[in-house]
Every structure is written in C-alpha cells, then in structure tokens.
Amino acid sequence: MTWKQKTALFLGSQALSLFGTALVQYALMWHVTLATKSGWLMTIYILCGFVPAFLVSPFAGVWADRMDRKRLIILSDGSIAVVTLLLALALRSGQNVLWLIMITAGVRAIGQAIQQPAVGALLPQFVPADQLARVNGIQSTVQSATFFGAPMLAGFLMSVWPLEYVFLLDVVTAAVAISLLAAFLKIPPHEKAGVPQSVSYFADMRLGFDYIRAHRFLVPYFSFVAVLLVLVAPAAFLTPLQVVRTFGSDVWRLTAIEMAFSVGMMTGGAIMAWWGGFTNRIHTMVLSSAIMAVCTSLLGLMPNFWAYLVPMGIFGVALPLYNAGATVLLQEHVEPDYLGRVFSIFTMLQTAMMPLGMLVFGPMSEYVRIETLLIVTGIAMGAQLLWVMNDRTLIAAGVPVVRPAEAEATTE
C-alpha cells in the first residue's frame, strides 16, 4: 500500500469518527445553551470539557512516544464511544440532568486529548516530509466537511429524536472507524514503541519540557499561540450565546452559524491543500491570525443575522491556514522521538488557554454585551501580531527544516 493510499484510509476513518463526535459535541453544547441561556453555565460546561484534557495531556504525549500510535488512537476512540453509549443509556432511563452531561463532556475530552498527539505524531511515520503541509491541508478540508454536515444533521435530529438517539450515532461511527483502522491500515510501530524505558513517566514528561526550553523558538512560539487562544475564546464559545440573546433562540440559527463556519473551513482547507501556505510557516500563521482578528471584531458589529454569517464564514477560512501552519512547523522542526511529547504539550496549551479565556469572558458576558467583548478581543489579537512580526527568533523558525520520514515513503 502506497503512502497516498494509507493517507486516504487514515483520513477517511478519522473523518467518520469525527463526524459522530461532532454530532454529540453540537448536541451537548446546544442543549446547554438553549436550556440555560447562561454565560456562567456555558463557562462550567467549557471547563468540564477542557480541564480534564489539560491534566491528561502530558501523559498522552509520553504514551504517544512510547506506545504503538495506531493502537493508542483505536483505544481512545473506543473509550469515547463507550462513555457516549453510557450517557445515552442514562438519558434513556430518565436521568436527564445537567451534571451528567458535564461529567460526560469531561471524560470525552480525556479521550480526545489522548488521541490528538498520537494522530499528529503518526502522520509523519508514513507521509513524506515535503508533503506534510498539503496532507494537513487535506485533513483540514475533510474535517471541515464533517463539521459542515454535522450541525445540519444534529439540528434536524434534535428536532425529531430524543437526545440519546443522537448520541448512539457516535457509537456507530466510532465502531466503523476503528474497524477500518484495525483491519486495513498497516503501519509498523515507531522505533521506541514497546521498548522498555529506563526513565519514569514523569521523567519522560520532563524531557519534553526540557526539549522545549532547549530550542529557542518554541518558547515564544508557544507564547504566541497561548495569547491568541485566550483572545479567541469569545468568538469560539460565546457566539452561540450571542446569537440566542441577540437574534433569537432557534436551533436553525445555531445550525446556520456552524454551517457558515464549516463552509469557510472547507474553503480554507482546500486552499491550504492546493497552496501549502507560505514557505515561512509563521507568515502563514500571521496572515490567518490577522483574518481571524478582523472577523472577530466584525462579529460584534453586524446589524442582522444574515450579515453576521459573513465574518463567521471568513473566520472559518482562516482557521485551517492557521492550524496547518502551526502543526507543520512542529512536524518539521521537532525530532521524531520527541514529537508526541511536544504535541501533547501543545495540546495541553490549547486545552488550557481557551478555558482560561472563558473564565474571564464567560462571567463578563453576564454584565458586558458579547458584541463589546468581540470587538475588543479582535483589536487585541491584531495588536499581538505586531509583536510576532518583530520577533526575529519566531520568523527564523518559520523556515522549514526537512527531516527524513520515520518509515519508508515514496512519492507515488
């Protein structure tokens, strides 16, 4: 099987699993939003979905560097499906309580935190280094397509089915995706998988942090990402609440904003797959961040719902450019033996900063109009980019360093 066939099989199975996950994600978030209309409870829900992932992320990176990454993906995906099935059964028995949904969000987040570093570290095992940017762009397009269909289907199913039936679809898609990976994708474990290690888990995690400190560009790079994610929090999490408060509490409106965002993401992913981004990955991230900054402020200025969908869609275009640039920069610069740990710390950063932003902006949304928060954070995001463009270490780090693939790969 060529690397292209392996890539198609892997991305296809991940898209199928992601589709079911997205259905549950939208159903849970919309249920909390429509049932409570509370910024405080939305903040609690977001924290339940991110704090557990933050705590487990360092271990997830060590596991991704020590274990068979394909097996780790299968185990985490299966665990998420089992927890979702248990929630569906609980709701079916009449236990429709908010705390149960919060706990489930936390457990599902742990599974996703384990899966993400393994996925990021597995791709370079069979994708040639000079094709990583385009493959990540294709992955963004595939993910965007699933997020385009998922809110439409979630909105429809929530209007005709009990909530627990929506959850069961995630169980089915996960089972099919796991079967495809287990039966057809043959990837030899990386060199360190299964080899007895002479250091403990905590020592191994510390090596990951030491690696980051030893490479000058990683500290300012992670700082750039951290600040950006804090400022993105209102656009990422408070826009559904903004729509409900400002334009009306209709499920179709929530579906529409997710569809606009997903169409934008599909477009951005296609652009990234065709273009590959600037040669300097930091330039790609700065361009996409500038677009997101402008769109964030515009989301606070739009006079009606249909106009509101325009910056929401353009924001979606920028996100795959940012994600691909950020991911490929690490894949190109980090040594393969440390890739899982560095990705786990990157995931930990992502899971910590946006909830941290929600700890500030969520409660503020009870007293300050969300439109005001969006305008201010958009301006702050733009100001941050001035610092990034003047950081010579970061700009120099954006130039790619091609490393040999871990596994033999042809460019057929």
Image (cartoon, rainbow, N blue to C red):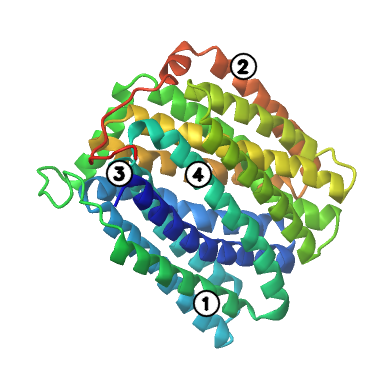
| Tag shown at residue 168 | 1
* N-term mark: 4 or 3: 3
Cα distance between the residues tagged 1 and 2: 47 Å
Q: Amino acid at mark 2?
A: Leu
Does 246 sit left or right of 258 as displayed?
A: right
Read off the residue under disc 4. 138
Which residue sits at x=85%, y=41%? 302
Residue in front for this viewpoint, 260 or 405: 405
Coordinates of residue 24 in the picture (x, y in percent)? 57, 66
Q: Nearer the viewer, residue 135 or 319?
A: 135
- Camera-near label (1 vs 2) is 1
Residue 279, placed above or below residue 56: above
Residue under the image location 59 percent in, 86 percent down:
94
Vertical side of 192 occupied by 404: above or below: above
Residue, disc 3: 126
* Upstream in sequence: badge 4 or badge 2: 4
Dot 1 crowding, Cα within 10 Å, few <14, some 14–19, many 20+: many
Give whichever of discs 2 and 3 has the lower sequence position.
Answer: 3
Q: CA distance from mark 2 to mark 3?
A: 37 Å
Q: Nearer the viewer, residue 33 or 166?
A: 166
**Amino acid type of the residue tagged 1 in the rendering:** Leu
Kind of residue at badge 3: Phe
Residue 386, disc = 2
Residue in the picture at 54% in, 54% down: 47
Q: Position of residue 411 (x, y in %)?
A: 34, 37
| Residue occupying the far front of the picture | 412
